[in-house]
Image (spheres, coloured by chain):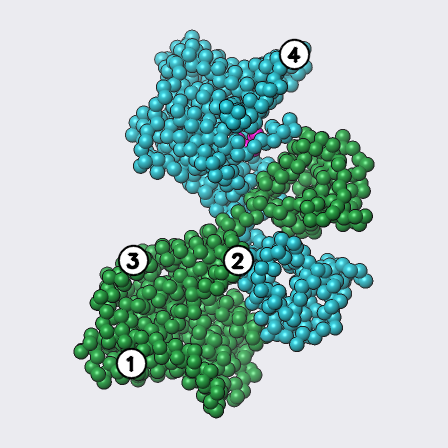
Chain colours: A green, B cyan
Amino acid sequence: MQRLLNIMPLSRWLQTYQTQHFVSDLIAGIIVAIILVPQSMAYAMLAGMPAEYGLYGAMLPLTLYALLGSSRNLSVGPTAIMSLMVATSVGELNPESSTQYIEYAINLALLAGLFLFLLWLLRLGDIINFISHPVISGFTSAAALLIITSQLPHIIGVEQAQKEEFIYVLVELWHSLENTLPITLILGLVALVVLWFFLKPLPSLLKRSSLPVTAQQTLSKTGSMFVVVLSTLAVALFDLEQVHQVKIVGAVLEGLPALSGIVVNFDLWSRLALPAVLIALVCFLESTSIGTGLASKRHERIVPNQELLALGAANLGAAFSGSFAVAGSFSRSAINYNAGAQTTIASLISAVLVCITLLYLTPWFYYLPKAALGAIVIVAALPMIDVSSFRRCWNFNKVDGLTMLTTFSMVLALGVERGILFGIACSMLLLIYRSSRPHIAVLGRAGESRDFRNIKRQNVSTQNNILVVRVDENLYFANTRYVEAYILQHCAPNSELRHLVLSCIAVNFIDASALETLEGLIIKLRNMGITLNLTEIKGPVMDRLNKTPLFDHLLPGRVFSTTDDAMGALASVSPH
Amino acid sequence: MQRLLNIMPLSRWLQTYQTQHFVSDLIAGIIVAIILVPQSMAYAMLAGMPAEYGLYGAMLPLTLYALLGSSRNLSVGPTAIMSLMVATSVGELNPESSTQYIEYAINLALLAGLFLFLLWLLRLGDIINFISHPVISGFTSAAALLIITSQLPHIIGVEQAQKEEFIYVLVELWHSLENTLPITLILGLVALVVLWFFLKPLPSLLKRSSLPVTAQQTLSKTGSMFVVVLSTLAVALFDLEQVHQVKIVGAVLEGLPALSGIVVNFDLWSRLALPAVLIALVCFLESTSIGTGLASKRHERIVPNQELLALGAANLGAAFSGSFAVAGSFSRSAINYNAGAQTTIASLISAVLVCITLLYLTPWFYYLPKAALGAIVIVAALPMIDVSSFRRCWNFNKVDGLTMLTTFSMVLALGVERGILFGIACSMLLLIYRSSRPHIAVLGRAGESRDFRNIKRQNVSTQNNILVVRVDENLYFANTRYVEAYILQHCAPNSELRHLVLSCIAVNFIDASALETLEGLIIKLRNMGITLNLTEIKGPVMDRLNKTPLFDHLLPGRVFSTTDDAMGALASVSPH
């Protein structure tokens, strides 16, 4: 029992839990629920599922994360990116019916959950280190663009395109502009304006009011709910569905989800495996980056490995309650924090409210127009397009900018899965390419001091028979040939040269290729009558080199602790 | 004209060419030809081509390299690895007839040559930097094993296996042991013993003799020729082919090659493209590493870009004279150097001798037994199995050892092409994984000095309100999360902490992911009431960071040139 409690961070928090904490959690839970209900339905539509499946994904997953998660504020449930990834992954498998579509989505969540569990068991959370920031950023921006274009048909009232390629969707959209339904368009635009009003001008207007802060916060978060209620009323009262063909959500299944939909089908699972791995990685990546940010505001840390367990459980929970893959939501987690949530009790309260919605309120959503849900998705996705991040990246470093641009265009051109894989491969290749031509400096003595500096940057004195070179990079396979060529090029024309001193102050590791190259360099230099000497080797590198015969092979070359020592000892020595 | 001469290193060497140089070149050219003729025919057999095609590959390619190459001693022509790669690449395309097989091999050489030309035009020779030493070493050893097993059927006198997988070939060999032809086996074993005798005991025996050094050298290199002549005589005199079913080379086409075999077939070319790229890379890699080694013995350097041109021309030459892909041969280049060749005139002489062989001597090879050629290939491939290199690699660094082992087993399991690609991918992933958990040290002041050292390695003094941390690695996407987690973990429990000092002395570059993480870290630390300060930033990193708003965001944290300066300034400051 104690062990079970130990793996539940919530049980620790409850040891110091007080009434005032519960009041804060209650308020935060209600505020989050107000945005969670419409968002869940909207993201279900984005994922290609009926609206109630979004609500399912906001109940059990939220509860499981609340029990197991190490972040007090992360709000788990359907998110825009997850829904997009589900839609593309399932869509590519060409399900034959909507029942099969739902089945595929459920099993995708199952596999993603199992993969997160596997990472937890193997403590392999480090796997996300292979995904660089430019890749994530390029991916997110492209995904947001895909999400927004996917919702535009709902706003203008036409059928959605069947393919996922961005260009194709745009062309389809262009062709269907003439079929725009005016009343649907008006509904959609009004919804967008109302959502924008709640997002931008309202909070500052409220600040000037005399309302208590909690009421201000709650009010400013009711935008989505307001749009849902108002647009539903409009459709129902003016019979917009019959008269103006406004598309509505229709019958939302009442009651709690049945535990079904999971099938043991290895053929299906093998086809879902790669998308599931990518969804799990993106889920973990998004959630932990949101979680760390919020935790630091409390002087706390999240435990990445605990997050693997909690997110794995949340996705399994999604699968068992018949829903699709979930992750931590950026917007809802921030709202949860700002509303003052103290523990994940707030999330449990949100889950209970979603449950009540499912039990008693679903008939009220019958006339909810899809245009309103589309508007909610668009407004949530807009901030994900991050142009400034690209500009910053490009200015800082062309290589990173290129990675971001590549990922962005590949996600648009090839789809989310292949796009992100392409971006990851690209970032690795460019990383290796970048360090394949390291900065190398020829050094000289600065004045009468013991310090040796770059002859190009400072006024230094050198000796004809000794060349001092410093490589500002780890020595490994990608740069070892370049370093060797540089050294031989600087040694060959100088017939007076007798000693080469290689300063290893900036070398944090040496791999087998570099070791091999050093061995070869010793012989090549010896053929020229030059000795190789090493200085300022770092502790860990020294430990490793001591296991090899390199230092014996150096002879008569030697290892010195400083370049100054080397110069003193070598100045008078002839090598042979 | 002058420009044309400029791209021919030979024309420069000829400006100081003297009679004594020509005598040296003549002797070296003859010695190399003595080994080149039998080796070429043997490697043709390994490549799955008739014997004369090996001789074709030893004529025009050798001549073109002699005119364009920047190495005085590299001997270009058929090599064991190239022949193996040709055999597997062409074999995988399932040619329908031996005519088609030859056509495929010729077009493969054409594409490899064009790809080398392309690299030359784009000056992209650096591409080989992506292939690490353990990958090359694992690849070579596995290739040697494949080469040797492929020749064993010739030695025991059975049919060759049709598949390329190592295990399959071994099983086939096991099953066909019962069909061993005794006389063929005896011929093969005798050939192996004779070759071994010429390789090992003979040179030392000759050294004790009173023969001139040139004669000694020439004699010790005649092993292959000796085996060829002797075994041919044995087969012809005792009618071994008819009586004992000894397989012979048969009619070797007399005369020079016809310029044919190249077809413009984009479908074929697209299927040959990937193998051609890999063959070109391995050719460039092998040749330049042999070339650099020999050049350094003369205090010279080879020009990698010139080598791309020369090797590209050599492979195009191979294609136009109807042969298969060629590269610099390790054994023949070393023989060329040791025999005293001064310029590539030696190679031109070898080429002329091969030409004479083709014109007048081919009928003499009719009775040459395949067992003898198999023995020549085996003896040439044996030294390529490099167990000591694996042991050294493994002892030095488990990661490199693992890369080598992976490449080795993947080449055996999946074949040469997929094996080398797998090895390259593996070395990149492991490289990134290795640097994803860098060495990080908490520092303290060593005694009363200005130096700060690792608190775990030395006796140092620290201050409660300042934490000094040094990261011994470049900051980039794969390790940035680890570094952040490490810092937050060390900051969270210490409530007295006010300043964090991050020493960047070992940081040679910072990528966009790390910049983003630093920006986030500033905020997270500020949330805890701690400032972030940077010290000892290197010049190139500083230049780059100055383009970003990072230093403004640091405030009230600052940038100091030394840790000592930082400690002095921060000791008395409270951050907020």
Residue A40: x %, y % from top left: 36, 74
Instruction: Please report the bounds of the magenta region as a residue range.
Output: B287-291
Amino acid beneath label 3: Tyr
Q: Disc 4 vs disc 1: Cβ atoms closer than 8 Å?
A: no
Q: Amino acid at mark 2?
A: Asn
Query: In the rendered structure, the residue with mark 3 lies on which chain?
Result: A
Q: Which residue is mark 1?
A: A231
State left or right for residue B492 relative to residue B385. right
> The disc labelled 1 sits on which kind of residue?
Ser
Q: CA distance from mark 4 to mark 2?
A: 69 Å
Is tag 1's residue or tag 2's residue first in the polypeptide sequence? 1
The 10 Å Cα crowd at callout 3, few under 14, some 14 to 19, many 20 or more, is some
- Between tags 4 and 1, which lies in front? 1
Q: Which mark is residue B403?
A: none
User: Label 3, on which residue?
Assistant: A168
Task: Compute the Cα span from label 4 to label 1.
Answer: 105 Å
On screen, residue A483 above or below B104: below
Q: Is residue A537 left or right of residue A434?
A: right
Question: Is the stretch drawn in magenta largely helix, strand or loop?
Answer: helix
Please tell me if label 1 and label 2 are on a single chain.
Answer: yes
Element under label 4? loop
Q: Looking at the image, is mark 3 or mark 4 nearer the viewer? A: 3
Which residue in the protein does label 2 denote? A395
Residue at image point 75% right, 41% down: A462
Which residue is farthest bottom? A210
Distance in Å between CA atoms under marks 3 and 2: 32 Å
Count of numbered marks: 4
**Amino acid type, callout 4:** Pro
- Does the stretch in magenta take in A485? no
Q: Is tag 3's residue or tag 2's residue first in the polypeptide sequence?
A: 3
